[in-house]
Image (cartoon, helix red, strand yellow):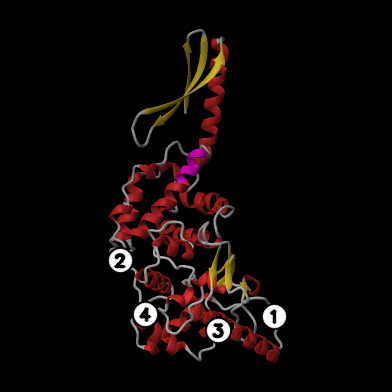
């Protein structure tokens, strides 16, 4: 960084040249008032230039990989959900460090980033190409990290703003799969009798997220009032379970339950108490537990779902697609999209969500018509 002085009117300023703007290509300068003395302005310019150059010195030997893993990523852990932070770390470890990890952060150029994106989209080593959405997520991680480096004075510009990356509008939307009402009924009949049938019934008839289902505790459910409150989630990170604060700001919500669901949950609670007494397990308060009284692992219920789907002979979908099934059936039944969206915990009705009506629309087989 270079500094010089300039005069406007009767005032002197220390002017610091900060390089070219990465987007416009124009020169960037910052002006610092120094009073009416030229000598004071010169001293200020020299000091500011020295400070900026000193901060940039640390970037000369700092690799991009070291910056990501020892500075940027640890700092992000303070403000991100644990599952989101783990996703950042996984993408950095798998896709960014092998290619860009040893490149000096000050020598990182747009062509380095573009080569990485092209390699991930069109691999030549026989590996499976990444989806454009995943490559865009990698780009956003790099852009965010370099923004932070600019703010810290380690680099003078963010080269990710210049590099070409997949555009969100150009990424094809993935068609969400959903069952018909008849296919959902066939699945529930096949699941009847399984130990986890109550969990599969509840997620099918409310459209809850898997994490929300497994994060339920008994004090979240009022069987007399037939309501359920979603206050937390249980997620898997590196196969370890962690409590999540919720995917969106709208995740915490109440869901009304129909009489059939109340009976299913009441019977499950009685069975759980007997099972825990038999094995000598202390009650933990979690609604859905394994035979040892511990919370169900997210992977376990997904695997159970996949096995029952195969046995039921219905089209193969993910457990998450039960949300889309529930939302689609409610909308077909005439429930307003906004109501369905709010019930699913989405902040935007663009998504297909679950309403607060449980199976009372008659879409899931026999149910009551409670007001």
Q: Could you tell me which residue is drawn at 55 percent across and 52 percent down?
A: 76
Image position of 64 with respect to 12: above or below = below
Main structural element of the magenta stretch: helix, strand or loop? helix
At 47% across and 82% down in the image, what residue appears? Answer: 367
| Left or right of 119 in this view: 269 | right
Labelled disc at residue 29 = none
**Gap between marks 1 and 3, in whole Å?**
19 Å
In terms of secondary structure, where does tag 4 sit?
A: helix
Q: Residues within 10 Å of mark 4 (few under 14, many from 20)?
A: some
Q: How many marks?
A: 4
Per the image, label 2 sits on a secondary structure element best described as loop
Query: Between tags 2 and 1, which lies in front?
Result: 1
In the image, the segment drawn in magenta is 146-151
Q: Earlier in the sequence, mark 2 or mark 3?
A: 2
The residue wearing badge 1 is 283
Q: Reading the chain from its start, which is encountered first: label 2 or label 1?
A: 2
User: Gap in Å between the C-alphas at discs 2 and 1?
Assistant: 52 Å
Depth check, mark 1 against mark 3: the one in front is: 3
Tag 1 near tag 3, CB within 8 Å? no
Q: Which residue is mark 3?
A: 264
The picture places residue 87, in percent across and down from the top left corner, at 48, 61
According to the picture, the residue beneath numbered tag 2 turns out to be 125
Q: Give the residue number, with chain letter if any, for mark 4.
A: 181
- Residue 203 lies, in percent from the top left, at 49, 76
Q: Disc 4 and disc 3: Cα gap in Å?
A: 20 Å
Q: Earlier in the sequence, mark 4 or mark 3?
A: 4
């Amino acid at each position: 960084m270079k500094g010089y002085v300039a005069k406007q009117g009767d005032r002197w300023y220390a002017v610091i040249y900060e390089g070219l703007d990465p987007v416009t290509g124009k020169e960037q300068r910052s002006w610092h008032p120094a009073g009416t003395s030229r000598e004071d302005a010169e001293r200020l310019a020299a000091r500011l230039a020295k400070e900026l150059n000193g901060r940039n010195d640390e970037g000369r030997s700092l690799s991009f990989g070291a910056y990501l893993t020892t500075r940027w990523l640890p700092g992000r852990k303070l403000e991100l959900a644990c599952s989101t932070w783990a996703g950042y770390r996984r993408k950095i470890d798998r896709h960014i460090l092998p290619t860009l990890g040893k490149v000096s952060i000050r020598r990182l150029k747009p062509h380095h980033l573009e080569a990485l994106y092209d390699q991930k989209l069109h691999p030549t080593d026989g590996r499976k190409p990444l989806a454009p959405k995943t490559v865009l997520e990698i780009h956003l991680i790099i852009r965010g990290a370099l923004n932070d480096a600019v703010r810290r004075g380690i680099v003078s510009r963010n080269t990710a703003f210049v590099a070409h990356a997949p555009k969100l509008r150009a990424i094809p939307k993935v068609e969400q799969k959903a069952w018909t009402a008849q296919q959902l009924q066939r699945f529930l009949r096949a699941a009847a009798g399984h130990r986890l049938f109550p969990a599969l019934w509840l997620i099918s008839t409310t459209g809850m997220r898997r994490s929300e289902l497994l994060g339920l505790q008994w004090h979240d459910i009022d069987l007399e009032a037939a309501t359920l409150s979603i206050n937390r989630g249980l997620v898997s990170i590196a196969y370890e379970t962690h409590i999540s604060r919720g995917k969106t700001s709208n995740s915490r919500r109440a869901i009304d339950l129909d009489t059939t669901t109340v009976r299913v949950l009441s019977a499950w609670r009685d069975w759980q108490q007997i099972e825990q007494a038999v094995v000598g397990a202390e009650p933990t308060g979690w609604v859905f537990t394994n035979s040892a009284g511990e919370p169900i692992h997210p992977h376990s219920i997904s695997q159970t779902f996949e096995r029952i789907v195969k046995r039921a002979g219905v089209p193969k979908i993910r457990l998450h697609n039960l949300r889309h099934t529930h939302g689609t059936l409610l909308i077909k039944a005439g429930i307003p999209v906004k109501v369905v969206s709010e019930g699913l915990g989405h902040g935007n009705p663009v998504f297909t969500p679950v309403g607060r009506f449980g199976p009372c629309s008659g879409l899931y087989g026999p149910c009551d018509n409670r007001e």
